Image (cartoon, grey):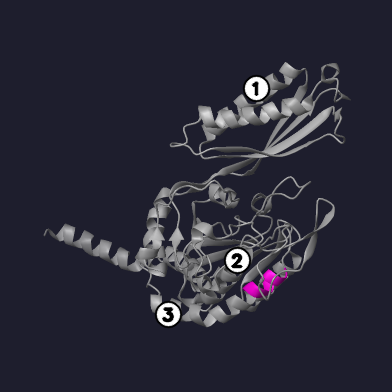
Amino acid sequence: MPLRLLALSATALAFSAAGAVAQVPLERIEAAVETATPRVVEWRRDLHRNPELGFAETRTAGVVADHLRSLGLEVRTEVGRTGVIGVLRGGRPGRTVALRADMDALPVLEATGLPFASTATGTYMGETVPVAHACGHDAHVAMLMGAAEVLAGMKDDLAGTVVFIFQPAEEGAPPGEPKGGAALMIEEGALADPRPEAIFGLHVVPGRPGTVFWRPQGFMAASDRIDVVLNGRQTHGAWPWKGVDVIAASAQIVQTINNLTARTIDPTTTPTVFTIATLDAGVRYNIIPDRATMSGTLRTFDIAQRDDLVRRAEIAIDNVAETYGATAEFAVRQNAALVFNDEELSAWLEPVLAEAAGADNVNAATPPTTVAEDFSYLSQEVPGVFYHLGGTPTGIDPANAPPNHSPAFDVDESVLPLGVKTHVLSAVRFLERP
């Protein structure tokens, strides 16, 4: 080999060696996770017993902040009302990566029968309601707290920074609030200082315990809230022709919406769900009212198709209203954008999650799901991957298990260490990238 090429080769090898980061052994991570697991279980049960609604997670935020401070992290509180940010700076400079968990519970009366079941109440839409962690966010917070503990324990060996994001109000903006938790945290600088190069998050869902699954590109649907107000003219139920019947118009609008999705959208290419879920009209059996209100949800995976469907729905609803002599008000509000998993990052993450869960327990080509997640706003800002963790209690068929948001939804606590491990490995291996 010519002397010049030898010199270049030596320089390249020296550069490669200088840029390389020693890999933290899996065995060390697993030992640290095992040590942290009893506390993770305790945190999960405590949080489950004391759930709080969106933007009211003051106790939860306090538990999180106190723990992060005890680990020596830089901590910011009240980011997005009740959100908490923890920053762990490694022993050497390097990349920055973010991990996220959501903290809020739901206005649901728990029916799990667990010894630590919630009896808490909260205020929702001006009324006192039961509150429960019926979506697994208690497990999410506990697992990320555990990951923070494990990563803080190897701080000196980390080349880079880990940002822990504990987010409020994932379940959508509470009534009267303009934004949900992720959007508000971004607005208040959650991703600004330091700015992550990537972000990862997880969600417990029905599935065999120990399994991890996701897909690149569109994974979880964009979610829009649809509101329709029909204005007619009140009349006696025996004389419908003397008024403008918003009840009949409402019924036709529901069928029109159903037909729009069933007859104009190819479900094999872009899954679409358009549901009218509430209809409020009238006060007496023999009076046709002058007003009816409807609300529903639209779930889509294609932005252009979504925009076109919204346009056509508004036209169709106006046409139905005009047919009956009524007028219609149509409004759309986005609750969550499409969860789009970065393709390059998804491909990189697959062997990392296989390292955590075992290759046989990882599925990187799971079908898209029509439920939504406002992690989507975070991953619009920086490349991200969101994945699901199977958490159905042992002995129950996941296909028949109570789903998220059910009063009977529960998480098998045996999956908590795996969630801690996937968080830790995602961060550690990302910081080790040359």
Q: Give the percent coordinates (x, y) of residue 146.
A: 56, 74
Instruction: Give the spatial CA distance, label 2 vs label 1.
Output: 43 Å
- Residue linked to disc 1: 315
Amino acid type at circle 1 is Ile
Q: Quick one: which residue is furthest to the front in this view? A: 238
Secondary structure at numbered mark 3:
helix
- Give the residue displayed 64% in from the left and 23% down from the top: 316
Position of 357 compared to 104: left or right?
Answer: left
At horizontal 47% and vertical 47% (from top left) the residue drawn is 368
Three-letter amino acid code at the position of disc 2: Asp
Q: What range of the chain is rendered magenta?
A: 44-50
Q: Residue at x 17, y 62 (%)?
A: 6
Q: Give the vertical position of 261 relative to 101 (above or below).
A: above
- Mark 3 highlights which residue? 28
Residue carrying label 2: 410
Residue 301, x across and y down, in percent:
51, 40
User: As drawn, is 180 to the left or to the right of 357?
Assistant: right
**Res 325 visible:** yes
Q: Main secondary structure of the magenta part?
A: helix
Name which quarter of the figure residue 317 lies in.
top right
* First in residue order: circle 2 vs circle 1: 1
Q: Which of 84 and 352 is in front in this view?
A: 352
Q: In which quarter of the image is residue 109?
A: bottom right
